[in-house]
Amino acid sequence: MKTLTLIAVSAAAIASAAQAAPSAKVAAKVAATNAWCRPTVAGAMAAGCYVTLTAKGEDRLVAVETPTADHGEIHTMSMDGGVMRMRKLADGVALPAGKTVALKPGADHIMLIAPKAQLKEGAKVPLTLKFKKGAPVTIEAVVQMPPMSGMAH
């Protein structure tokens, strides 16, 4: 009888440890800072958001979710013969270990497709960033005008 009790207690301990293990593995491996989104006009079809990411180990930003829009996408922007071209990055953005990666205007960034309401200056937009290896990170991006660097007037 003692043997059966010992087996039952051991099995319960193993099952409990197995259930706890996934949460131990999903510790945040990516730091997200300086998150912001551009204000939009009413009825805007998309909104741009930006954030600085630093991964502890090599990873990749693969998806963005938010309740404030139909869906989020990871985009890149480039100039081609004086024409701005924007495209979705199907594989997301690489995050080299220990390197800071800035998603910023004029480069890689987050697009919120079909915002459910106008993004007004001062509001906060919840974004859940999903990574290939690391645990998801939920942040609040402040809606604000972009910094006006290089303006000489």
Image (cartoon, rainbow, N blue to C red):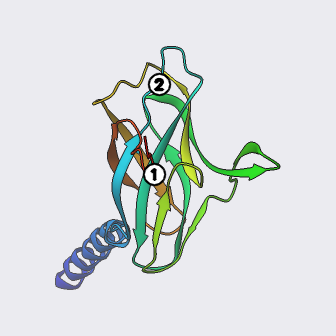
Which residue, given by chain and number where applicable, does mark 2 sit on?
A: 40
The x and y percentages for residue 88 are 69, 47
**Which residue is at the front of the view, 153 or 107?**
153
**Which residue ends up furthest to the right in the rendered image?**
81
Identify the element where label 1 is drawn: loop
Tell me which residue sits at (41%, 44%) in the image.
148
| Kind of residue at disc 1 | Gly
Tell me which residue sits at (43%, 40%) in the image.
153
The x and y percentages for residue 98 are 42, 80
Identify the element where label 2 is drawn: loop
Quarter of the image for residue 66 reads top left
Q: Indicate which disc residue 150 carries.
A: 1
Image quarter hosting the N terminus: bottom left
Tell me which residue sits at (83%, 49%) in the image.
81
| Kind of residue at disc 2 | Thr
**Which residue is at the front of the view, 20 or 45?**
45
**Which residue ends up furthest to the top in the rendered image?**
42
The x and y percentages for residue 137 are 37, 55
Looking at the image, is mark 2 or mark 1 nearer the viewer? 1
Q: From where the camera sits, is residue 135 visible?
A: no
Category of crowding for the residue at label 1, using alpha-carbon neighbours closer than 10 angstroms: few (below 14), some (14–19), many (at least 20): few
Tell me which residue sits at (28%, 69%) in the image.
16
Q: From where the camera sits, is residue 101 visible?
A: yes
**Which residue is at the front of the view, 15 or 76?**
76
The x and y percentages for residue 57 are 45, 79
**In the rendered image of this protein, does residue 55 appear above or below residue 125?**
below
